[in-house]
């Protein structure tokens, strides 16, 4: 009896989970479907739109009108670059906070997180002036630094939480065997924390890929990533839904595929500890 | 030896100068994503043939994103753009602030005298033309001729609001998802407030009196809002408080609207290939109430040059090309007269071929019916038909628009929405120093 009720519950939970997943995924699914319709069909009622013939015309037009490869490469450079830079800073910082905490470590962690609570537009003008004065407007290097800084608190927090799970005795043993600090972090801590670092890295790449405030404000042409590619197809005076959907699909496809293949790693890193 | 050195030096100098003369100047143009602007990007070969030493980088963004970005750039003298696409709202404010380069010295073939006076007037400050209009628009009534005929009605060329209400009532058949009238309801200074401000002018309302006191507590505004809510609640589509230009365009194209009062630029869409009612659309002037002002607006997307640019000459060459009479002829030759950017030049409307376009005359009449310098029945201290040309207007009008949109959605009453609009406008105008 108890087994039957557990089984029914499992089925119910599975159905609910799939339903929630479908609701969350539905806008993306609809965008993809709409991208394969003509502009005229895209504005029809939902069932009429689905029944309309499939078409690649929006993709062809988007491809002809925009330099997708430039925007794509910029997105790759910005997201990977900012992630690597963030890890270089965050791994030693998280190590220090996890294994040699000071009196103010907790306060420091909370302060770092508090920087995420301020709306970005609040510092738009000072940031813009700094970028202008250093000649960094529309440059990838400037944007890599900005994306690193805005995601750094999350990266440090994630790594800190993960490192806390690793028993300090293992590192102590390495030290007793004569390992230097660098060797301890590189050869003992890092290999044990690979799942955590990988999931942090993936999450950071996704966050940087989707960042749409600073990437729109601080770039014009040369450093503009896919967020600007999408924004260029949004129009308040004209129905370009099919082309906007095609541009959105082209922009999210790479990160969607990356997320799909790495979801196990991502979930494992986010939900399990280092030594479990 | 001396001769050889001299010859070498001379050759080097010549090559350097030639190189400098041949050097390519790259300008960055910020623009919005609409049909006319996209068409221009497809015709750039003509510009490059005439200006081989200038390269153009395009930055195309959604209107609000573009506005925020170019405002930040121009206010901080960031210098990211050499040509900006801006509207009639920004030009007087930015021109006055010294943020734009005067275009009074464009070449003679630009022919500034050919610009439509109403459009040029909105882009001129103290005798300086600060932006060159790329396309101009007003608003007008677009209606279904077949539904009017079936109802036994005829739409006058210059209808009153009473005519509009009678037509909306006659054409509404909610069982068939056919609504007599579709109007903007989505909150925003450029959305519902563009329509309602223009409409209020024809009801004798105004945003401010001569001392900058808000006027939402006056009868004309109460009449405007009451009439609008009555029209939309009885004859409008469901969920109208979420409808902006694009949503209404989709509804009209799918045959769900008997009438739509909106931008004249929509005429080419509702009669275009994506419209299911393209051959059944008639046009009329925006309505009035017999007070001498019609409920139509005036807008022009224009090209301006920020004062911070280092490439003003190249930018002027581009602006001259894109807004010259020759450009209109170029578009006509490549894409047909129906696709020529409308509403900027008198010569276009004198052209016999263009006069054959069904909405050409009504567009011109609508533009001529708007007067941005005297927008209201009573005198006011501001310019602008569907906006007030002060920097604070965007924020205030969006907040007021939220109140009116809530009244349309039924979450607040008309009286409460007007009271809230009066209070918040008074607070902001006092804070900004207009009200002493």
Image (tube, rainbow, N blue to C red):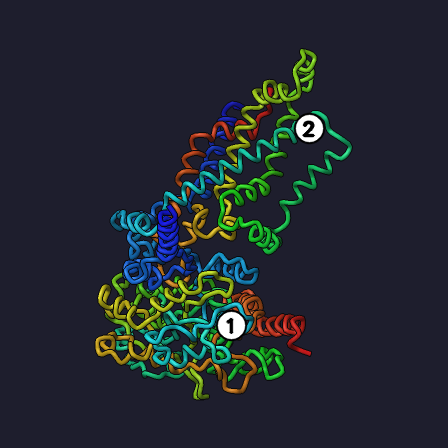
> How many residues crowd mark 2 within 10 Å: few (<14), some (14–19), many (20+)?
some
**Which dot, 1 or 2, sits closer to the camera?**
1
Instruction: Depth check: give the residue in front, A183 or A40.
Output: A183
Residue B36 appears in which quarter of the rendering? Answer: bottom left
Q: Estimate the x, y position of residue A62 in percent, counting from the top left.
A: 33, 50
Q: Chain of mark 1?
A: B
Q: Chain of mark 2?
A: A
Residue with the mark numbered 1: B95
Instruction: Depth check: give the residue in front, B248 or B86.
Output: B86
Residue A263 as seen in the image, left or right of residue A68 = right
Instruction: Report the residue at 45% width, 43% height from top.
Output: A23
Instruction: Report the residue at 31% width, 61% height from top.
Output: B47
Above-or-below relation of B51 to A159: below
Q: Estimate the x, y position of residue B104 in percent, counting from the top left.
A: 43, 75
In the picture, the quarter occupied by the C terminus of chain A is top right
Instruction: Depth check: give the residue in front, B123 or B405.
Output: B123
Residue B305 appears in which quarter of the rendering? Answer: bottom left
Residue with the mark numbered 2: A96
Instruction: Report the residue at 59% width, 83% height from top.
Output: B209
| Residue B282 seen | yes
Q: How many marks?
A: 2
Do callouts 1 and 2 point to residues on the same chain?
A: no
Instruction: Report the residue at 49% width, 75% height from top.
Output: B197
Q: Estimate the x, y position of residue B376 in percent, counting from the top left.
A: 50, 83
Secondary structure at numbered mark 1: helix
């Amino acid at each position: 009896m108890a087994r039957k009720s557990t089984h029914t519950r499992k089925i119910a939970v599975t159905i609910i989970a799939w339903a929630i997943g479908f609701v969350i995924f539905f806008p993306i699914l609809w965008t993809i479907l709409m991208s394969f319709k003509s502009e005229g069909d895209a504005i029809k009622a939902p069932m009429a739109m689905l029944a309309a013939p499939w078409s690649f015309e929006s993709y062809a037009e988007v491809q002809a009108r925009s330099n997708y490869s430039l925007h794509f490469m910029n997105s790759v450079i910005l997201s990977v670059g900012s992630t690597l830079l963030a890890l270089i800073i965050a791994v030693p910082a998280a190590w220090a906070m996890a294994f040699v905490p000071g009196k103010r470590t907790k306060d420091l962690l909370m302060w770092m997180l508090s920087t995420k609570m301020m709306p970005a537009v609040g510092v738009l003008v000072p940031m813009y002036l700094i970028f202008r004065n250093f000649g960094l407007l529309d440059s990838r290097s400037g944007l890599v630094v900005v994306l690193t800084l805005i995601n750094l608190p999350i990266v440090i927090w994630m790594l800190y939480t993960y490192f806390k799970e690793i028993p300090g005795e293992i590192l102590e043993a390495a030290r007793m065997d004569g390992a230097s600090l660098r060797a301890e972090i590189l050869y003992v801590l890092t290999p044990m924390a690979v799942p955590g670092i990988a999931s942090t890295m993936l999450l950071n790449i996704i966050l940087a890929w989707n960042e749409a405030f600073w990437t729109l404000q601080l770039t014009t042409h040369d450093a503009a990533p896919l967020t600007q590619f999408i924004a260029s197809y949004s129009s308040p005076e004209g129905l370009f839904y099919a082309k906007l959907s095609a541009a959105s699909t082209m922009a999210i496809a790479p990160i969607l595929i990356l997320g799909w293949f790495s979801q196990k790693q991502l979930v494992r890193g986010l939900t399990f500890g280092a030594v479990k | 030896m001396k001769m050889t050195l001299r010859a070498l030096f001379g050759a080097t100098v010549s090559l350097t100068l030639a190189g400098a003369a041949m050097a390519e100047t790259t300008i960055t143009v910020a623009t919005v994503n609409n049909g006319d602007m996209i068409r221009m990007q497809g015709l750039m070969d003509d510009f490059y043939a005439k200006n081989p030493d200038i390269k153009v980088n395009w930055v195309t963004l959604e209107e609000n994103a573009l506005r925020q970005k170019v405002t930040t750039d121009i206010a901080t003298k960031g210098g990211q753009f050499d040509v900006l696409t801006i509207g009639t709202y920004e030009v007087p404010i930015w021109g006055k602030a010294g943020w734009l380069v005067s275009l009074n010295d464009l070449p003679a073939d630009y022919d500034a005298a050919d610009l439509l006076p109403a459009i040029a007037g909105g882009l001129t400050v103290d005798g300086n033309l600060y932006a060159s209009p790329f396309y101009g628009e007003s608003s007008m009534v677009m209606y279904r001729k077949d539904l009017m005929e079936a109802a036994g009605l005829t739409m006058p060329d210059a209808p009153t609001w009473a005519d509009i209400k009678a037509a909306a009532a006659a054409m509404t058949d909610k069982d068939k998802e056919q609504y007599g009238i579709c109007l903007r309801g989505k909150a925003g200074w450029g959305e519902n407030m563009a329509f309602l401000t223009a409409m209020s002018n024809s009801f004798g309302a105004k945003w401010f009196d001569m001392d900058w006191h808000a006027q939402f507590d006056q009868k004309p505004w109460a009449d405007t809002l009451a009439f609008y809510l009555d029209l939309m609640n009885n004859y409008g589509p469901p969920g109208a408080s979420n409808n902006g230009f694009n949503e209404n365009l989709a509804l009209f194209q799918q045959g769900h609207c008997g009438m739509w009062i909106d931008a004249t630029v929509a005429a080419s869409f509702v009669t275009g290939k994506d419209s299911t009612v393209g051959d059944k659309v008639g046009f009329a002037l925006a309505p009035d109430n017999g007070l001498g002002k019609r409920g139509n607006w005036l807008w022009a997307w224009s090209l301006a040059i920020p004062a911070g640019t280092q490439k003003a000459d190249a930018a002027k060459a581009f602006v001259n090309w894109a807004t010259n009479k020759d450009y209109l002829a170029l578009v006509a030759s490549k894409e047909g007269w129906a696709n020529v950017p409308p509403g900027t030049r008198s010569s276009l409307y004198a052209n016999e071929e263009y006069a054959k376009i069904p909405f050409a005359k009504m567009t011109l009449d609508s533009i001529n019916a708007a007067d941005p310098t005297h927008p209201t029945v009573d005198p006011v201290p501001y310019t602008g038909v569907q906006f007030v040309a002060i920097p604070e207007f965007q924020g205030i009008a969006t907040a007021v628009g939220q109140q009116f949109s809530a009244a349309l959605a039924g979450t607040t009453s008309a009286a409460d929405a007007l009271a809230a609009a009066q209070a918040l406008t008074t607070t902001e105008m006092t804070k900004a120093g207009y009200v002493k």
